[in-house]
Amino acid sequence: MSIEKKAMQRIEKEFKDMTSKDSLYSIGRDSNNLFKWNAMIQGPEGTPYAGGMFSIDIKFPKNYPFTAPKFTFKTQIYHPNINSEGSICLDILKDKWSPPLTVEKVLLSITSLLADPNPDDPLVGEIGELFKSNKFLFNQRAREWTERHA
């Protein structure tokens, strides 16, 4: 069986798992390309992202799950670990990726990142600095962006 065929089977299984039970996330996929999904996640309660709905595109490589999928925020967000292009600084999407990880586990990690940003490994340096120096102002800006974009 080809690597791409194995990837398709794994992707199909994960899609069924996430759509056949109560999932915290809303998942859709491109009807013409099983390797492209979209997820909607809710901003965690008790954070400046609460009340927001954030769209994330997911693109699977042909050798999934041996290589991490690419997760990209489509909804603009004010966060030290997510830049204006939607790239996400998250170790499990890079060097800490392993085949047992699933889309659902990554989305859970992204939700955790929204609740607990990592200003010491920022993708956007000035937002990371603001988070460390003036959390009140950071929260205010993040809330404004959430109200405006999410």
Image (cartoon, rainbow, N blue to C red):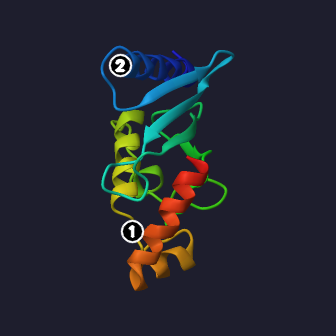
- 1 or 18, nearer to the observer: 18
How far is mark 2 from mark 1, CA to CA? 30 Å
Q: Secondary structure at mark 2?
A: helix
Compared with 90, 22 (above or below) is: above
Classed neighbour count for the residue bearing mark 2: other residues with Cα under 10 Å, few (<14), some (14–19), many (≥20): few
Left or right relative to 141: residue 103? left
The spot of residue 102 in percent (x, y) is 38, 34
Q: Residues within 10 Å of mark 1 (few under 14, many from 20)?
A: some
Residue 128 x %, y %: 48, 76
Q: Which residue is mark 1?
A: 118
- Whether label 2 touches label 1, CB < 8 Å: no
Left or right side of 116 for 67: right
Look at 40% across and 76% down and name the residue there: 136
Q: Amino acid at mark 1?
A: Asn
Q: Identity of the amino acid at label 2?
A: Asp
Can you give x and y, in whole percent of width and height, for residue 148 in the image?
A: 60, 53
* Residue appearing at x 49%, y 35% in the figure: 40
Query: Splitting the image into 4 quarters, where does residue 133 fall?
Result: bottom left
Q: Is residue 120 visible?
A: no
- Residue 86 position (above or below residue 7): below
Given residues 45 and 82, the one toward you in this image is 45
Q: Residue shown at 44%/57% (left/top)?
A: 90
Secondary structure beneath dot 1 equals loop
Please, is residue 127 above or below residue 93 in the view? below
Res 92 seen here = yes
Return the residue at label 2: 17
